[in-house]
Amino acid sequence: MNTSELHLDPLDTQLRQLLQGGDELADAGFSLRVMAALPPRVSAARRRRARWLRRAHWLAMSLAGSGAAALLAGAGAPQDPAHVIGGLVLIGLLILWTLPSRWLRP
Amino acid sequence: MSSADAAAEEARLVARAAAGDRAAFAALVQGHQGYLRKLLGRICRGDQGRADDLAQEAFLRAWRALPGFRGEARFRTWLTRLAYSALSAERPALPTHEAADEADEGVASDFAPGTDWRLDLDRALATLSEAQRHVLLLCYGADLSHAEAAQVLGWPLGTVKTQVLRAKARLRDHLQAWGPQP
């Protein structure tokens, strides 16, 4: 408690003696344990870049999904081979982009 | 080193650690681990293993949050606040200020007075409510001001002051009932 809040009260003194009594604990490897557990610090610029990459990733997946649906739409209608190939390529890209990528993690 | 020099040195270490300097953060850990582990040991009623886990979690949170630390509070107060956040994440039953206002019943005790005032006071402390125990540990054990204790607990300042007064009144009642007044 700060000096401004000190009262000449024996109970205050005894509480302080009791609750502050005893030595502070020796480090005994605690600091090393903490430092070993520290995660790498991610810079703000890197976090921003990862955020934009994530957005671009979702946009690309949405476009690929929409493109594949548009190219392969029309059940029963004869499909132009180029459209089929284009649709399959987009589906392939969609599958590829849904795979987790460490580059997207901050 | 004077307290002003120590505060300036600590501010430098905090700034370097916030910028990602691990050696500066290690110095902060070494400087505050004794205080924090001792306080948490008391909060955890002597379970030092659990206290050390909480202290480690508080330091990890500090490392992550340091870039956002603006120095509005002392580093020690901020660290204690992070330790309490870790404690409440682990034990959501930590008293809130609403509960602190309501819970003034304390814990029933049937112990006899001891001859040593420390023993008497220690036993009297065991009769306090959780909220009162926490507030005394912070204000007297950790030597925080009422305002700092309010920051740590997330309570209004008035609640902290009220809880300190009630806790001391309860302690006095017990101690007077058992023997010579402290």
Image (cartoon, helix red, strand yellow):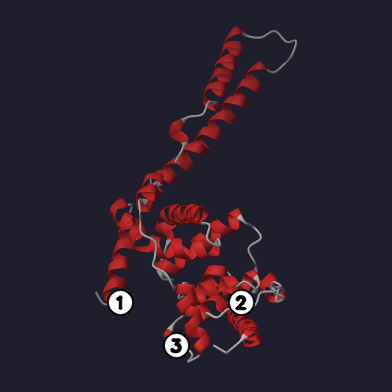
Left or right position of A48 against B27: right
- The answer to whether the residue labelled 3 contacts the one labelled 1, judged by CB atoms less than 8 Å apart, is no
Q: Residue at x 38, y 63 (%)?
A: B32
- Chain identifier of the residue bearing label 1 in the image: B
Q: Quadrant of residue B63?
A: bottom left
**Amino acid type at image mark 1:** Ser
Relative image position of residue B176 (x, y in whole percent) = 63, 88
Residue in the foreground of this view, choosing between B82 and B139: B139
**Helix, strand, or loop for circle 2?**
helix
Please tell me how crowded label 3 is: few (under 14), some (14-19), or many (20+) other residues with Cα within 10 Å. few
Could you tell me how far apart the alpha carbons at marks 3 and 2 are, in whole angstroms?
A: 26 Å
| Image quadrant where residue B16 sits | bottom left
Circle 3 is placed at which residue position? A4
Left or right for A68, reference A25? right
Element class at badge 1: helix
Residue at image x 59%, y 72%?
Answer: B133
Q: Which mark is residue B3?
A: 1
Looking at the picture, do discs 3 and 1 lie on one chain? Answer: no
Residue hosting label 2: B124
Q: Between label 3 and label 2, give the one nearer the viewer.
A: 2
CA distance for labels 3 and 1: 17 Å
On the image, the x and y values in percent for residue A78 come to 70, 7
Numbered label attached to residue B61: none
Q: Can I make out residue B145 in this image?
A: no
